[in-house]
Image (spheres, rainbow, N blue to C red):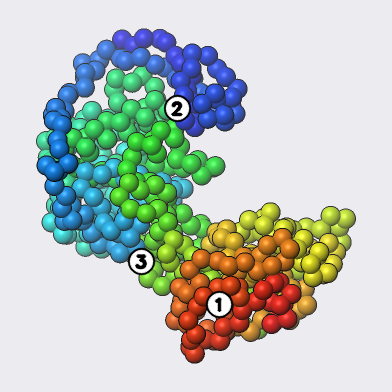
Amino acid sequence: MAKSRNTAFFCKECGFESAKWMGQCPACREWNTFVEEPVGKSEGPSGKIRPLQKARPARLSEISIDERDRDSTGYKELDRVLGGGVVAGSLVLVGGDPGIGKSTLLLQVCRNLAASGKKVLYISGEESLKQIKLRANRIGQVSGELLFLCETSLDGIQETIMEIKPDVVIIDSIQTMYREEICAAPGSVSQVRESTNLLMQIAKGSGVTIFIVGHVTKEGVVAGPRVLEHMVDTVLYFEGDRHASYRILRGVKNRFGSTNEIGVFEMREQGLTEVENPSEFMLEGRPENASGAVVACAMEGTRPILLEVQALVTQSNLGIPRRTAAGTDYNRVNLLMAVLEKRCHYEMSRYDAYVNIAGGMRMNEPALDLAIVLALVSSLKDKPVDEKTIVFGEVGLSGEVRAVSMAEQRVNEAVKLGFTRCILPQICLNKMKATDKIKLTGVRNVREAISEL
Ligand code: TYD
Ligand code: MG
């Protein structure tokens, strides 16, 4: 195959193309992101793209929308993140660390879709058919029309799709796919970009729903250019702690619904199962009567999740005390300690402090502030907080407790899980209806909250 020997430099972040290497990308301002890749089309036999059907302009009134265009994936948790089910002809990117369960999730979705009468084609560029079979055995019975293919050439894949006309296609993973006419190696910026481009044409042209698996880099972005995220309709991230069994599916971009929804799954022996009540899950195995532990209520989209905030405050032997924050924002913890020092006159600078969100969940919502403050004080004084109490509220720099959104949903969640008392911002309390199911204590500032302990 004759290939032109030219190369160009591409930004790994945004796909910007340049003739020479540059330290900083002029488009996205990231440093040291340029990689050299061959450019130009190879003149192989399959160098030409087959044109898809020619599109015709249409009036709005001629376009029919059908609610049945959304298909359930068989998982309520996933349907919610997708905005109510998958839309036919959409392109969905599922990103996540290696080994988090992307292939498992999609295989289970395939099983459900095939069982509901869809024709599904699962294309793997990473695993052999035997490996897929082993995994399928673990997730249980497969019925209906579910086909598997091991292939990495997208031109071949395009032909197969045209030939067998599936309803749903899974591409596992985009980094292993290549187009023959691009000289660069699979996984490179130009390959990933062109491959996604072709998949988008296939999805939009023939109405096939395509799920793409994408690996993420250390920094937590999908490897390959960010243009990948621009091209697809929906971007979902599958995240979770390696050591914890739960997994969170987060919508980052969605052309068919809101992006602030999450789905919670648990990895078990037989694959992933849905977790319908994440609060219960997060509060499992809570220590009894331990100081420095406070239950907080955070929101994930429209969903309240109760979490245990833990703090350990110990005398420091160092000139600069140690502070760590696991699962929450380190700078926020520092700020809250400064508030305690200045507004409540605790000598925090003499103590090391470790803050942790139990269960491995990551949460940066300001509504956790008050719980972090109370956990710190509880640990400092070595005084346990009543375990049937939940706390939420944002803390400002003058030590005031500020209102947070959706207070009522948070309180309802606490009632549902059997909590008997809630410490919340006074402003939120003023707007709420009285209830006798739970004792509500409004606080105006951090000092009031501490005196309520
Ligand atoms: P996988 O879906 O292969 O991850 P990805 O495609 O994101 O790289 O998930 C693999 C992990 O999941 C592996 O560590 C084993 C675990 N697993 C289970 O615990 N139970 C199961 O039933 C399956 C299929 C996998
Ligand atoms: Mg995989």
Q: How much space separates mark 3 and mark 1, taking CA atoms?
A: 37 Å
Q: Position of residue 158 (x, y in %)?
A: 20, 32
Q: Amino acid at mark 1?
A: Asn
Q: How much space separates mark 3 and mark 2, taking CA atoms?
A: 36 Å
Residue at (79, 67) in percent of width and height? 343
Horizontally, residue 363 falls left or right of residue 251, namely right
Residue at (45, 40) in percent of width and height? 222
Horizontally, residue 40 falls left or right of residue 309, namely left
Question: Which residue, given by chain and number where applicable, does mark 2 sit on?
Answer: 15
Residue at (17, 59) in percent of width and height? 115
Ligand 1 closer than 8 Å to label 2 CB: no
Q: Nearer the viewer, residue 31 or 146?
A: 31
Q: Residue 368's quadrant in the figure?
A: bottom right
Q: Amino acid at mark 2?
A: Gly
Question: Which residue, given by chain and number where applicable, does mark 1 sit on?
Answer: 430
Q: Is residue 78 visible?
A: no
Horizontally, residue 435 falls left or right of residue 109, namely right
Q: Nearer the viewer, residue 409 or 196?
A: 409
Which label's residue is closer to the chain start, 3 or 2?
A: 2
Assess disc 2: are there few (<14), some (14-19) or many (≥20) residues with their C-alpha within 10 Å of its C-alpha. Answer: many
Q: Secondary structure at mark 1?
A: helix
Q: Position of residue 354 (x, y in %)?
A: 71, 63
